[in-house]
Amino acid sequence: MKHVYDWLSWAAAVITLIIIIFASSSLINGRLYDDDIPASWDDITETFHRWEYGEPAKNQDVQGEKQFSSDHSKVIIHTVSGSVKVTGWQEDYYLVVYDRSSISQEHMADAYADIAARNNKIEILTQYRPNIPGIKGSIEYTVFVPESCLEISVNTISGAIQMDSIHNHTAVHISMVSSNVSVSGGSVLKAFGFSSSIDFTLDGSHVHIETVSGSVFGNLKRIDQDKSVIIKTSAGDITLILPEDAHAKLHGLTETGSISYPENFHELQMSDKKQEVRGILGDGGAAINLESVEGNITISIQ
């Protein structure tokens, strides 16, 4: 009986596949459409995407800017390869500047900067016309944020990210594939990437960074006792600078590298099998976990 059910399931799958192929073929050849609407699949998709993507791109200046009130508390940026610069300032509004000048003239109508305020958030999105291969160039963004900004979120594939003078109560979230990141300021930093190097100076000590391949250099100006620092990389060095009055519990682990730490760490525990160190700085407190599979770990006090 089991074989009968298996055969019936296989037959049903074949029939379903034939129906899908026939329907797809009918769409491509225009057999399911009347004569007064586009018959080919290319015409149908072009008609749809021309109105959704082409008109905004054609009407957008090569360079421009938009202002938003300080009522918004979050900035979200989605881009593919263009650089992103974010700066904290004392003005009472947001300013978003875009630059499309690196896009080739032949593809100027295939990409535009979609910048809008939605639900108490400022959203910045690079829109590309689908199925257009070989678009040369990218859109770059420069964003100025007031003190009312509580969170900055950036998602990119390969665009460089630079943040300066971020207000000390602002949280920064970054997701990237292959990118160089520099962050100065802020109280929270969460960054996840594949092949990315990260350099940060933080006013707080809530850090969570994970990257597959890339070095991490961090400078913590303050250690919060109820926060944690997690930095992990598979292939890359980790360097972390702590303030002189820091109180923390340290765990450092590397498979093939070395671990350097200050002499004033106490209650040290070292593993014989791996390069692993546990220790206390001051009275303990904040948990610091540093892990690199193939890289050195260096901790210093400044």
Image: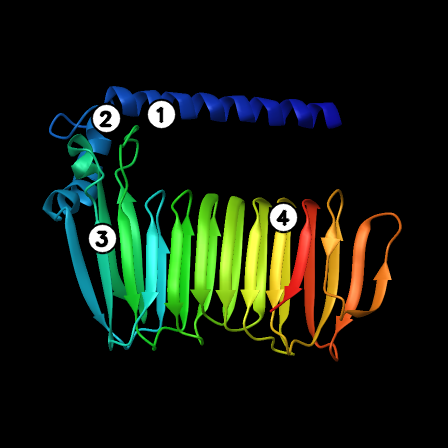
Q: Amino acid at mark 3?
A: Tyr
Distance, label 1 to label 3, CA atoms, is: 43 Å
Q: Is residue 177 above or below residue 31?
A: below
List the residue tagged with mark 3. Answer: 98
The crowding category of the residue bearing disc 2, from other C-alpha atoms within 10 Å (few below 14, some 14 to 19, many at least 20), is: few
Q: Nearer the viewer, residue 250 or 174?
A: 250
Q: Is residue 104 above or below residue 122?
A: above
Q: Amino acid at mark 4?
A: Asp
Q: Are marks 1 and 3 in contact (CB under 8 Å)?
A: no
Image label count: 4
List the residue tagged with mark 4. Answer: 237
The crowding category of the residue bearing disc 1, from other C-alpha atoms within 10 Å (few below 14, some 14 to 19, many at least 20), is: some
Secondary structure at badge 2 equals helix
The crowding category of the residue bearing disc 4, from other C-alpha atoms within 10 Å (few below 14, some 14 to 19, many at least 20), is: many
Dividing the image into 4 quarters, which one contains the C terminus?
bottom right
Distance, label 2 to label 4, CA atoms, is: 50 Å
Does label 2 or label 4 sit earlier along the sequence?
Answer: 2
Q: Are marks 2 and 1 in contact (CB under 8 Å)?
A: no
Residue 103 seen in this snapshot = yes
List the residue tagged with mark 2. Answer: 42
Does label 4 or label 1 sit earlier along the sequence?
Answer: 1
List the residue tagged with mark 1. Answer: 23
Distance, label 2 to label 3, CA atoms, is: 31 Å
Secondary structure at badge 3 equals strand
Distance, label 4 to label 3, CA atoms, is: 34 Å
Q: Is residue 46 above or below residue 294?
A: above
Provide residue 263's location: percent of width, then percent of height: 76, 66
Q: Are marks 2 and 4 in contact (CB under 8 Å)?
A: no
Does label 1 or label 3 sit earlier along the sequence?
Answer: 1
